[in-house]
Image: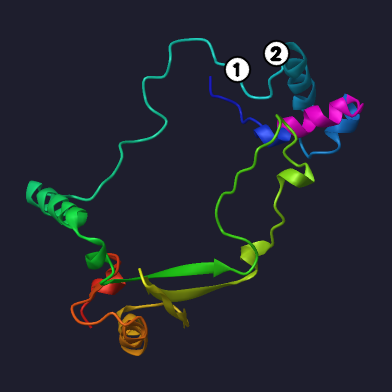
């Protein structure tokens, strides 16, 4: 027999919270939509087991994992050895060597908060307590993309990226900002420019 659709844990917690507040089954079923047949079962389970999550089902355990095999890039043994050699190369570099490196990267800044999961320390169940939530707006309220560079000597130019960035735009950003930044930091001769392996950074234009 197929497994019936279950309510989310957030919805179950909300039903239990309404029950704790003194509401009856019929009143609760009018609050969240389409849960009338579930309310009684959820509250009974909470009273008996103090759980709002599903209990382990009977029968043999599932032999398949909830996720598939991890994917990774197709690398030959030579590629792995080259990567390891590259990673181990700078381990013995001196402080003076690292001061010759100019780093760069791009980042997206949200106008309203950050577009990622944030965690808080809280007691069990009060998910929607105001001190446990972050205010949000749709799509983060807008964002901007920035390119910047820095070295051990400090930070320098910060450039706004207008529109989608491709290889041509990346080269234009470097033409206008990289050498002036190196001169500002007084990098001297023999400095090294370090960026990541983003396809836009390595494309031929």
To which residue does mark 2 refer? 49
Marks 1 and 2, the one that precedes in the sequence:
2
Relative to residue 195, is residue 36 drawn left or right? right
Between marks 1 and 2 in the image, the one whose residue lies nearer the viewer? 2
**Secondary structure found at label 2:** helix
**In the picture, residue 157 is in which quadrant?**
bottom left
**Towards the viewer: 108 or 84:** 84
Q: Which residues, given as a range, are shown in magenta?
A: 12-24
Query: What residue appears at the point 60 percent right and 44 percent down from the top-left corner?
Result: 119
To which residue does mark 1 refer? 55
Residue 49 picture location, percent across and down? 70, 13
Query: What residue appears at the point 29 percent right and 65 percent down from the top-left corner?
Result: 196
**Secondary structure found at label 1:** loop
Query: What residue appears at the point 41 percent right and 19 percent down from the top-left corner?
Result: 62
Relative to residue 44, is residue 200 drawn left or right? left
Q: Is residue 5 above or below residue 113?
A: above
Crowd around label 1: few <14 · some 14–19 · many ≥20 (10 Å): few
Residue 2 picture location, percent across and down? 53, 24
**Towards the viewer: 103 or 145:** 103
Evaluate if marks 1 and 2 touch, with contact meaning CB atoms under 8 Å apart. Answer: yes
**Towards the viewer: 201 or 23:** 201
Residue 35 on the magenta segment: no
Q: Is residue 203 above or below residue 117?
A: below
**Towards the viewer: 65 or 90:** 90
**In the picture, residue 138 is in which quadrant?**
bottom right
């Amino acid at each position: 027999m197929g497994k019936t659709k279950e309510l989310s844990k957030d919805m179950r917690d909300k039903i239990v919270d309404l029950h704790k507040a003194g509401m009856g089954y019929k009143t609760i079923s009018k609050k969240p939509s389409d849960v009338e047949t579930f309310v009684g079962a959820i509250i009974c389970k909470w009273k008996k087991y103090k759980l709002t999550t599903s209990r382990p089902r009977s029968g043999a355990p599932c032999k398949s994992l909830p996720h598939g095999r991890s994917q990774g890039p197709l690398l030959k043994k030579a590629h792995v050895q080259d990567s390891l050699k590259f990673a181990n190369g700078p381990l013995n570099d001196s402080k003076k060597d690292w001061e010759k490196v100019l780093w760069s990267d791009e980042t997206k800044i949200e106008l309203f908060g950050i577009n990622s999961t944030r965690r808080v320390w809280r007691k069990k169940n009060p998910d929607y307590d105001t001190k446990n939530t972050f205010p949000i707006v749709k799509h983060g309220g807008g964002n901007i993309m920035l390119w910047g560079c820095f070295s051990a000597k400090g930070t320098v130019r910060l450039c706004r990226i207008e529109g989608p960035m491709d290889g041509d735009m990346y080269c234009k950003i470097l033409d206008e900002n990289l050498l002036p930044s190196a001169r500002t930091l007084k990098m001297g001769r023999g400095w090294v420019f370090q960026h990541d392996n983003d396809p836009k950074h390595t494309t031929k234009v």
